[in-house]
Image: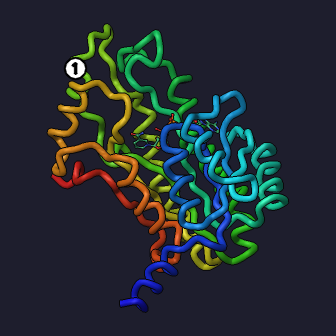
Amino acid sequence: MAATGRLLNKLFSLESDIAVVTGALGRLGSVWIEALLEAGARVFALDLPGTPVSEDFLGLQARFDETHLRLQRTDIRERAVLEEACEACMATLGVPSILVNNAGIDRPPASTETGYRLEDIPLEENREILEVNTLGLFLTSQVFGKPMLRAGHGSIINIGSLYAGVSPDVRFYDHIQDDPPFIKPPAYGASKAAVVNLTRYLATHWAPHGVRVNALSPGGVLGGQDEIFRAKFCHRVPMGRMAVNHDLCGPLLFLASGASSYVTGTELVVDGGFTAW
Ligand SMILES: NC(=O)c1ccc[n+]([C@@H]2O[C@H](COP(=O)([O-])OP(=O)(O)OC[C@H]3O[C@@H](n4cnc5c(N)ncnc54)[C@H](O)[C@@H]3O)[C@@H](O)[C@H]2O)c1
């Protein structure tokens, strides 16, 4: 039994890893970062200039010093800025061996003053989402993938979404009194579907060089959603609930660590069974 325990600890250990996480100051950023730090990795965190440091991230900074956790302001749409960040990561923590492409844009209900009917959504709204969620993710993979390829070793985890595979159910939002009625931006699911395919593309190119690339697609994560939404959403999930932070950590550590050493080009869907029926 003790030998099995040691094997398990070793399989999931990230003691010698340097992990880069984008979108570090958002809702899920700290969830991924805490899991990586707890597994022994050192973390180089990226987020946009001007994004306030979240309470959760402050909590992590209080627990882990700068030899374990660093934050660098970086817009993932800009190659030169990403290259600077990569240099800074190597100079301070070391060569990155894990990349969590987590930065993303969505438009939750009531996040903007103006809603649109599907026929009238300006292209700009879609363009910005695609630029960050898909192209920014690609650029980040190019820049941080390079040192991984040189080292012959790395794991890239692209954060997808339930909506990479299915369209949002508009009935989840039909209690919201908006005119025009709220709809999720069409580019969101499209950008995430593109992420899943890009994952396969990168995985096939980089597999011979020791770099694995997988997607992790969460279902709805419990956050500030209203009660009626939650009830409708949970009714639609075989497990009867939304994801909580803890549900996401195991899948991330699996993909980041040697526990998934023969897994590449796959999409790990963590949705409580939402897409199973
Ligand atoms: N929260 C959920 O329920 C859920 C479900 C499925 C998938 N996801 C995905 O998980 C990821 C994180 O979601 P979240 O809920 O934490 O979102 P969030 O909006 O709370 O955080 C996103 C972070 O990305 C950063 N960001 C945006 N544009 C950037 C850019 N150009 N450069 C660098 N950083 C940028 C933002 O500043 C923000 O801190 C996203 O990719 C999202 O699509 C979330």
The residue type indicated by label 1 comes to Asp
**Residue 43 in the image: x percent, y percent?**
66, 56
Q: Nearer the viewer, residue 29 or 57?
A: 57
Work out whether residue 23 can be spotted.
Answer: no
Q: Is residue 251 left or right of residue 155?
A: left
On the image, the x and y values in percent for residue 258 come to 52, 77
Query: For the point 41% across and 63% down, which residue is it?
Result: 250
> What residue sits right under mark 1 in the picture?
174
Q: Which residue occupies the foreground of this view, 85 or 231?
A: 231
Q: Using the image, determine if residue 91 lies above or below residue 134.
A: below
In the picture provided, is 50 more to the left or to the right than 230?
right
**185 vs 62: above or below:** above
| Residue 97 at x, y percent in the picture | 66, 67
Callout 1 secondary element:
loop
- Residue ID at (70%, 27%): 50
Residue under the point 23% across and 48% down: 274
